[in-house]
Amino acid sequence: MASAILRQTRSSALKSMFDNLRMGGSSMSYAKLAVGTDIVSAAPDVSLQKARSWDEGVSSKFSTTPLKDIFKGKKVVIFGLPGAYTGVCSQQHVPSYKKNVDKFKAKGIDSVICVAVNDPYVLNGWAEKLQANDAIEFYGDFDGSFHKSLELDKDLSVALLGFRSHRWSAYVENGKVKVLNVEEAPSDFKVSGGEVILGQI
């Protein structure tokens, strides 16, 4: 009897947790980021941090990369995710881009980019673990300013992650967003995968 009650309590707690994660999903207005938006103008004065080792960070004097250097004059596929080393991100999201990188290149894509609210050193270790750093460029949004500027930030404290980002993907040409996909909940993997956006380019 006690174990049945415990199972029911755990089930209710998990359902509540995922309901909380889902709040503000598909009905949320992404006012700063939409098809036609200039992603550089939408996040003014924001830079990202290319994934690297600590020693590389020190030798580069902790340099950052302005968004214009990432997007201007280029065709870019970018995807954002809640965090390095997490389940869906590691098992599905990154692999869906890694295995399709040659198909993206065949469509004229200059770079495939993964961005997460993590420091660049954690992202570097994660990229190496996934053996994805040769196919995908990883960038850290260490303080979440990039995702906040685009209104793609999300409070994931319920999962002990703090403020992170939605799970999303976009095709950006010369800084202009041509395609945008945002998952209803960070735990979802329905519209932001590599196969989906490959078919949208």
Image (tube, helix red, strand yellow):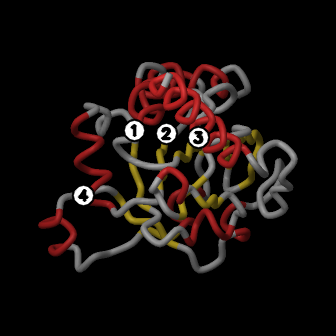
The picture places residue 177, in percent across and down from the top left corner, at: 74, 49
Residue type at numbered disc 2: Val
Between circles 4 and 3, the one closer to the viewer is 3
69 relative to 128, above or below: below
Between circles 2 and 4, the one closer to the viewer is 4
64 displayed left or right of 182: left
Measured in 3D between alpha carbons, the distance from the residue under mark 4 to the one under mark 3, in whole angstroms, is 38 Å
Q: In the rendered structure, which disc, 1 or 3, sits on the residue that comes first in sequence? A: 3
Residue type at numbered disc 4: Arg
- Label 2: state its secondary structure: strand
Q: Evaluate if marks 4 and 3 touch, with contact meaning CB atoms under 8 Å apart.
A: no
Q: In the rendered structure, which disc, 3 or 2, sits on the residue that comes first in sequence? A: 3
Measured in 3D between alpha carbons, the distance from the residue under mark 2 to the one under mark 4, in whole angstroms, is 17 Å
Q: In the rendered structure, which disc, 2 or 1, sits on the residue that comes first in sequence? A: 2
Q: Residue at x 78, y 51 (%)?
A: 24
Q: Residue at x 75, y 39 (%)?
A: 179
Q: Evaluate if marks 1 and 3 touch, with contact meaning CB atoms under 8 Å apart.
A: no
Q: Name the residue under label 4.
A: 52
Between circles 1 and 3, the one closer to the viewer is 3
Residue type at numbered disc 1: Ile
Residue type at numbered disc 3: Ala
Q: Name the residue under label 3.
A: 13
43 relative to 13, above or below: below
Q: Evaluate if marks 2 and 1 touch, with contact meaning CB atoms under 8 Å apart.
A: yes
Density class for disc 2 (Cα within 10 Å; few <14, some 14-19, many ≥20) is many
- Label 4: state its secondary structure: loop
Residue 168 visible in image = no
Q: Residue furthest left?
A: 55
